[in-house]
Image: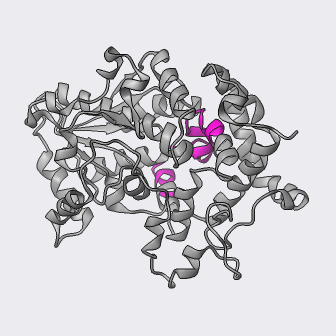
Amino acid sequence: MANKSEALRAARLFEFYTKYVWPLHRILVKNEIAIRCSHCAASEKMIPLTATGLCQLCQDLSPGVQSSASIAAAPSSAQRSSNQPTQDLEQKFEKQDSGISNTEALNLILTKAQGTGKRGYDALVLFSGGKDSTYLIRRIQEEQPKLRMLSFTIDNGFMSPVAKENIQELIPRLAIDHVFVTPRKEFYVKLFRYAITHLNSEGGSGTVDFSDGEFMLDTARRIAAEKQIPLILCGYSKYQVQNGLNLKSFESPPSRERTDRLSTAGLPLGDIFSPEEVEMWWHGTRWPENQVARLLFPLYAWNLEEIEIKQKVASWNLLNKKNHSPIVTNHQLIPLLGVVDVHKLGFSSFEIEFCRMIREGKARRCDWQPVFELLEYTSKTGFFVKPTVMQSLSDLNLNLEDVGIRFDR
C-alpha cells in the first residue's frame, strides 16, 4: 500500500494550500476552472447556473426554506442493490413514529435498549476516528449513560493514518470497548478495482465509496447478530442516509435488515467475488429475527450543522483541529475517486453532498468551495495529487488509461 507518512504529508499539504495559497493561485487560473453557484458552490458542470449567478436549486429556494428539488438534485439510486424495499414501504415505515420528533423517537429506542443485549452490549457503534462518529459516541454516553456500547472499526486497507491514530488515542479517552476488523487486502483490492472500472451514474461516491460503506455495514450486521447486540449505530449524515441509502428515516426498515445482499452499488456480487467471498456479505434470512439488529442513524435524527459538531468535539477536547478534517481522516482512495470523477463527470461526485449541506445551512461555502476548485484544477494538471493517484492505481493494479485519467501537465 501507499507509504503512510507520504500520504499524510500530501493530505496536510493539500489542506494548507487550500486555505492559504489557493485564493491567490486561483486568480491566475480562474479561466481553467468551472464557474460555481455563488450560494452553494455547485459547479456549472453539475447543475446549470442562472443569470443571477445561482444554480437553479438556489434560485428556486425561498429564504430559509429547503427546496423540495434539493433532494432530487443528486443522481438516482436506482442502480443500487436490487434487494432494497420499495419507496412506499420506506414511507410507511417512517410514519410509525408520527407525532413525536426524530430526536424523541431515537431517545425512546435507545432508552428501551438499555440492558437488553444478551452478551454484555446493547449497541454496536461504527467508529471511523473522525469527528462525526466521535461526536455520536460522546453524546450518547452523556444522554444514555446506561447504554452499553461496543465500538467497531473496519480497515479497508486504505485507512488514513490520522484516522488510525485518532482511534488509538480516543478509545481509552472515550472509555469504550472496541473491536478492529481487518479483512484480507485482496478482498478490498478486488472490490475497489472492479467498482472504479464499472462506475454507475453516481461516480466514485456512489460506486466505490458506497460499496465500501455497504460492506462496513454488512460486517457490523454480522457482528451484531453473532454477539446478539440489539442496535447498530452509524454516523451517516442525513444526506448520506437519504441519497446514499435511499431511506427517509433515521432507521433502516426491519424488512431491509432481514434480506440477503445480492449486489452493491448495482454491481452483482457474483461478478466480483468467489462464492466464498460472497459469503462475507450480509445474509439476513439466515439469522433468527430476534438476532437481526436495528440499524439507526442518530445524526439523521439530530440533523446538526457541521460547524456545531466540530465545536462540540473541540469543547470535549477529544480531537484537535488538525485531526478532524475530512481531508486527513478520509481513506486514501478519495483523491483518486475525485480525479476520476472530474475526468468523467466534470466535478467530484462528493461535491453533491457538501453543496446540499451548504444550501441547507449545514456547512459553510467558504470552507468547501476552495477544496472543490483545487481538486478540479489538480485533477486536470496532476498538481499535488499525481503521486497519490499513481500510488493508489498501483495498489489496485490499474493505470491511468484504465480509469480515463489524463493529466495535462
Where does the image place residue 127, in percent across and percent down from the top left? 40, 37
Position of the N terminus by quadrant: top right
In this picture, is 36 found above or below 114?
A: below
- Specify the farthest residue to the bottom: 62
Where does the image place residue 266, in percent across and percent down from the top left? 41, 40
In this picture, is 73 found above or below 280?
A: below
- Specify the color scheme: one colour
Q: Nearer the viewer, residue 163 or 44?
A: 44
- Specify the farthest residue to the right: 28
Quadrant assignment, res 246:
bottom left
Residue 318 falls inside the magenta stretch: yes
Where does the image place residue 164, in percent across and percent down from the top left? 51, 29
Quadrant assignment, res 274:
top left
Whether residue 401 sits left or right of residue 305 in the image: it is right
Q: Nearer the viewer, residue 208 or 41?
A: 208
Position of the C terminus by quadrant: top right
Residue at (58%, 41%) from the top-left corner?
A: 323
Residue at (65%, 36%) from the top-left corner?
A: 336
Whether residue 270 is visible: yes
Count how many numbered circles sit on residues in the image.
0
In this picture, is 182 found above or below 282?
A: above
Where does the image place residue 229, in percent across and percent down from the top left? 18, 34
Q: Which residues are magenta?
A: 311-337
Quadrant assignment, res 289:
top left
Q: Nearer the viewer, residue 124 or 43?
A: 43
Residue at (61%, 68%) from the top-left corner?
A: 40
Whether residue 320 is visible: no
Residue 147 falls inside the magenta stretch: no
